[in-house]
Amino acid sequence: DPLIYIDGIESNPTDLARLQPDNIENFSLLKDDSAAALYGARGANGVILVKTKTGVSGETKLNVRVENRLSTNTKNYQLADNITYMRLANEAVSTRDPLGAIPYSPNKIDNTIAGKDPILYPNNDWIK
């Protein structure tokens, strides 16, 4: 690992990773002979020098950065209603395995169409 100095204090890679980019005034990278000449054998793998911004006396300045994001569907899909879904799910099972158990009985489909019991046979429009 390189030798890391933040404001003249020896630090570790975790301290460097926690440093906010907006707080960095400048940084320098020393490598090869220049690092070894200044820092000896400890600088053989390179040296990272980071100087952070410091406060100055005078009028107060406030810097603000605002980020915004907008996300939306690229395409709105037409979805099947519950009755069509139940029929297609039964058809899919019958096509794959003619002896397989169908997930929705004809009785359940008929009662959902009739709207007999909205708790037992719901027909919700989840999009709306």
Image (cartoon, helix red, strand yellow):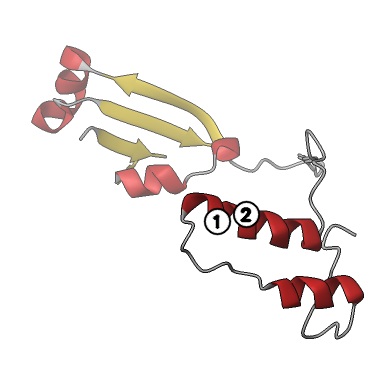
Question: Which sits in the foreground, 127 or 43?
Answer: 127
**x then y, percent, for residue 68:** 79, 41
Asked if disc 1 and disc 2 are in contact, CB closer than 8 Å, the reply is yes
**x then y, percent, for residue 118:** 85, 82
The residue singled out by tag 1 in the image is 94
Q: Regarding mark 2 in the picture, which secondary structure is present there?
A: helix
Q: Regarding mark 1 in the picture, which secondary structure is present there?
A: helix
Task: Please say if 23 is above or below 127.
Answer: above
The residue singled out by tag 2 in the image is 91
Task: Please say if 122 is above or below 19.
Answer: below
Point 23% across, 18% down: residue: 31
Q: Residues within 10 Å of mark 2 (few under 14, many from 20)?
A: some
Q: Quadrant of the C terminus?
A: bottom right
Q: Amino acid at mark 1?
A: Ser
Point 22% across, 25% down: residue: 46
Q: Is residue 1 visible?
A: yes
Point 76% across, 71% down: residue: 109
Instruction: Kindly indicate the quadrant of the structure image that contains residue 62.
Output: top right
Question: Which sits in the foreground, 66 or 44?
Answer: 66
**x then y, percent, for residue 20:** 54, 43
Instruction: Kindly indicate the quadrant of the structure image that contains residue 47.
Output: top left
Q: Amino acid at mark 2?
A: Glu
